[in-house]
Amino acid sequence: RKEVEQDPGPFNVPEGATVAFNCTYSNSASQSFFWYRQDCRKEPKLLMSVYSSGNEDGRFTAQLNRASQYISLLIRDSKLSDSATYLCVVNMAVRGGTSYGKLTFGQGTILTVHP
Amino acid sequence: DADVTQTPRNRITKTGKRIMLECSQTKGHDRMYWYRQDPGLGLRLIYYSFDVKDINKGEISDGYSVSRQAQAKFSLSLESAIPNQTALYFCATSDRDSYEQYFGPGTRLTVT
């Protein structure tokens, strides 16, 4: 079983739609969770961290369910510029541990927003 | 100017050749990483370094070696390239107190 699993998609949605991505992780000791965005042939960039209580950044909402080992990303009012690959990322280390800072990436979910 | 740079950006090489990919950063971060990305497999960690004297293998280090020449420089070498090392390679950095990693623009390597 992969440590971080995502539905690869592709998701093809019209502008203005709401779309949700899911991600599961296998290691219950995982400590920190993130969503990164990667444009075609570009480097990944941090989109947002995911906090236990859930968090929102404009049109983006991230949720974490530790009991089910499940992370989600919701995008409301999709824009053409949201077209990208979204990477679910997990850090399994505790602060101060020797592997602190190592991230495990899911394979990514492709989103295409069309006019 | 970019904070994390990689050279070369594209490289085509033949099986058996030695090749070095270089990464430099101006962010002042202690931690540096090398990943490869393959379609359908996501990013996989090859090596990481938490400071100049601390270098560790990642999940797919076989066939690769690294050198941390200075805080700002981290090189990845393929001693004898093989076709299944054809991939997009990314260097990344992070500060010791943050999980956020900053990636370079990537090197597209093709081994024929």
Image (spheres, coloured by chain):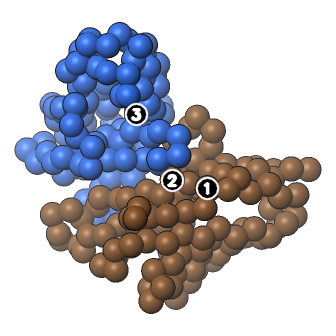
Chain colours: A brown, B blue
Q: Give the residue at x 45% y 80%.
A: A69
> Residue A49: x, y in percent?
49, 69
Q: Give the residue at x 29% y 58%.
A: A102
Q: Which residue is mark 2?
A: A107
Q: Which residue is mark 3?
A: B89
> Residue A114: x, y in percent?
86, 50
Calculate the distance from the C-alpha at mark 2 to the C-alpha at mark 1: 7 Å
- Mark 2 burial class by Cα count in 10 Å: few <14, some 14-19, many 20+: many
Marks 3 and 2 belong to one chain: no
Which numbered circle lies on residue A8?
A: 1
Q: Which numbered disc, 2 or 1, marks the residue that appears first in the sequence?
A: 1
Whether residue A104 sits left or right of residue B52 in the image: it is right
Judged from the image, the secondary structure of the residue bearing numbered disc 3 is strand
> Residue B107: x, y in percent?
43, 27
Calculate the distance from the C-alpha at mark 3 to the C-alpha at mark 1: 21 Å
Judged from the image, the secondary structure of the residue bearing numbered disc 2 is loop
Q: Is residue A81 visible?
A: yes
- Mark 3 burial class by Cα count in 10 Å: few <14, some 14-19, many 20+: many
> Residue A47: x, y in percent?
56, 60
What type is the residue that disc 2 sits on? Gln
Q: Give the residue at x 22% y 40%.
A: B61
What type is the residue that disc 1 sits on? Pro
